[in-house]
Amino acid sequence: MLKTLYLILLAFLTSSIAYAQPTPLLDESIVRALTEELSGETAKRNLEFLARQHRMRGSEGFHAAADFIAGQLRSYGLHDVSLEQFPADGKRFYGTQKARRPWDAEFAELWELQRDGDQWTPYRRLASWDAMPVSLAQDSESSDVTAELTDIGRGTSEADYVGKDITGKMVLTSSQPGAVADLAVGRYGAVGIVSYAQNQRSAWWGENENLVRWGHLTTFSETKTFGFMVSLKQARALQQRLAQGESIRLHAVVRAGQHDGYYEVLTATIPGSDPDLKNEEIVFSCHLDHQRPGSNDNASGSVTILEVARTLQKLINEKKIPQPARTIRFIWPPEIEGTVVFLNAHPEITRRMKAAIHMDMVGGGQETKAVFHVTRGPMSLPSFIYDVAEAFGGFVNEQSDAMASMGQSAYRLHAPEGGKEALQAEFVDFTSGSDHQVYSEGSFRIPAIYLNDWPDRYIHTNFDTPAMIDPTKLKRSGFIGAAAGYFLATLSAQQARPLWTHLQAQVMRRTARMFERRNVLDSEEADNLARIHFWYERNQVASVSSYTKISDGLNREIDDFFMHLEALAGTRSDPSAPSAHGTLVFNRNPDVKGPMSVFGYNYFTDHYGGARASMIRLFRHQGLRGAGGAYAYETLNLVDGLRTTQAIRDIVAAEYGPVPGEMIVEYLRALEEIGIVTEKP
């Protein structure tokens, strides 16, 4: 038996995902109905409206976008369509999110002036809010000022200002406006900022000199100023002239600023049909806010879950698919902060959420260089739902490859106006960076599937336009999400065994990868990796029981399977086995819900102090597959009043790479000091 398992593991090391059945998990008729109804063109038409709105939190543009989607939802026949408002005054908290005041802009222009006799007259317009809203940094404040321009380079340290008098001047910087405002404006007296910050580093970073990138000032900074964003080409021309001793005079007019207002979160539902299960919810999530045009980030996710809503409701109305047993909810919030607000404001809904399917950047065409990812949740939250998403992602890979390679496929997973290349989705471990990290966080523990493009060479720029969006990609993303969500919403005891067949194969694939990973570790860490691996795999299979009953016979079969695998690995699946590190146990404060770092605000740094926070060693730790922030996120997620600090260390070490136990304890003690955790006697 062990020899057979070993040979199977070796086979999985070199195999690609394959399915014995023509469609995974769902009946063929349902899969065909979804592939025929989902429309990448319909999604893109909706996207074109969103891309015309500058969709900042609480802004007029965000409201216009939300109101448009609400109208579409009503026309599609969705239920409970509601655009909720939550006060945002810069003071109140929703869990760990300090409510950021809304920001709007009415007008902004930056002109270069030239001398005309005794007068200075406008000569060249460098930036315009009306023409390109991304050219005004978010959270800029009103101003009307004429000043000379001076180059401060990075401008983030005292050394950048040595020998420079910038009082009353505008500063040109390679950093984000928010990173230099307190020094340049607050301390040294500059009157405004011109930035060419090259954010979102990737292989194409800095290559396109014509991109204007999204800039930000710091929401809660006491230094109120404005920032304009210019392209790298504009900045280099200005730098060259300044280096030659030329005086450059600029005139900036800004009418913009923060104001009291509201977060807005749009929701709608497809009600469940089962009296016993309709109070359980499967959530489709995105984030609606972004600068204009913000097409892939994230009009694409916003319109794709809208297309999923249209498709499912239409197919149910036409009786082509059964109404799901569980309720399906759709949510359009501002990124991260809106999700934290909603989950804290509605604990009764949060408790009903069984899973989230989050889409953030799912439509990038070939020009964007995007690679599509189906991303699992963190190891702190084992769940079978990640393998469900991979099943449908693998199916799309197969079908799209058949179309690209042979000109035909069994199911229509390309759009008439879109591309026909293979999707080649990657199936990857947890990465943060969007609302899925809120659902997965230890306060809420809602397993989340994350569908996303990365890299995208036009993210956060004026080139993130509808022209870069592929309707085929929107359709394929929509299918993976719709199929996974519908399967979870209809999962019953009859599907337990076919689901286990799929899970079994995925467990074997990950076990093969675990064997590879432990080869680079010393014996103690290798043993820990294997032990935690099987703890995780057992629990992700066991999570099926939160949806439906698993028969005693199937449970025995599952247990026997894992016993043989563990014997092959020479380990067991007990993550709390004693060892030499700490044995402290901490409870989490249930009254403060959410991650420590949210959007535009860091709860830990604000309460613990920036200088002291920078000394926490865990934040600087570099692991094999993750770095400081990932370790910190998971450390807090694993605090449950039962695990010792040793058990927490062992899990994060297995997930991201070895880490000293004292770093875990140091961080938990810091969290204890600010009231997030308390030591359990």
Image (cartoon, grey):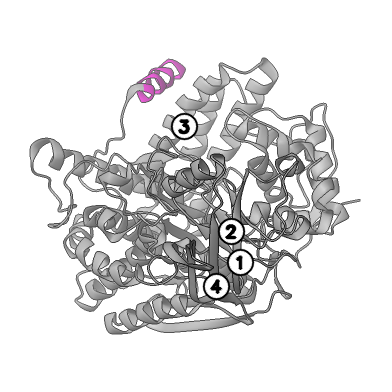
At mark 2, the secondary structure is helix
Q: Is residue 55 left or right of residue 47?
A: right
Q: CA distance from mark 3 to mark 2?
A: 25 Å
Q: Which residue is mark 4?
A: 254
Q: Position of residue 195 (x, y in %)?
A: 55, 52
Q: Nearer the viewer, residue 568 or 233?
A: 233
Above-or-below relation of 578 to 33: above
Above-or-below relation of 320 to 232: below
Q: Residue at x 84, y 35 (%)?
A: 582
**Quick check: marks 2 and 4 in contact, CB under 8 Å?**
no
Q: Nearer the viewer, residue 92 or 195?
A: 195
- The image quarter containing residue 634 is top right
> Which class describes the residues within 10 Å of circle 2: few (<14), some (14-19), or many (20+)?
many
The mark nearer the N terminus, 3 or 2, is 2
Q: Residue at x 81, y 59 (%)?
A: 607
> Which class describes the residues within 10 Å of circle 3: few (<14), some (14-19), or many (20+)?
some
Q: Which residue is mark 3?
A: 510
**Quick check: marks 2 and 1 in contact, CB under 8 Å?**
yes
State which region is magenta. 1-13
What's the amino acid at mark 2? Val
Q: Which residue is mark 2?
A: 438
Q: Residue at x 40, y 40 (%)?
A: 427
Q: Say which of marks 2 and 4 sits in front.
A: 4
The mark nearer the N terminus, 1 or 4, is 4
Q: Which numbered circle lies on residue 262? A: none
Q: Nearer the viewer, residue 523 or 402?
A: 402
Query: Residue 12 lies in magenta, yes or no?
Result: yes
What's the amino acid at mark 3? Arg
Q: Is residue 270 visible?
A: no
Q: CA distance from mark 4 to mark 3?
A: 54 Å
Q: Which numbered circle lies on residue 340? A: 1
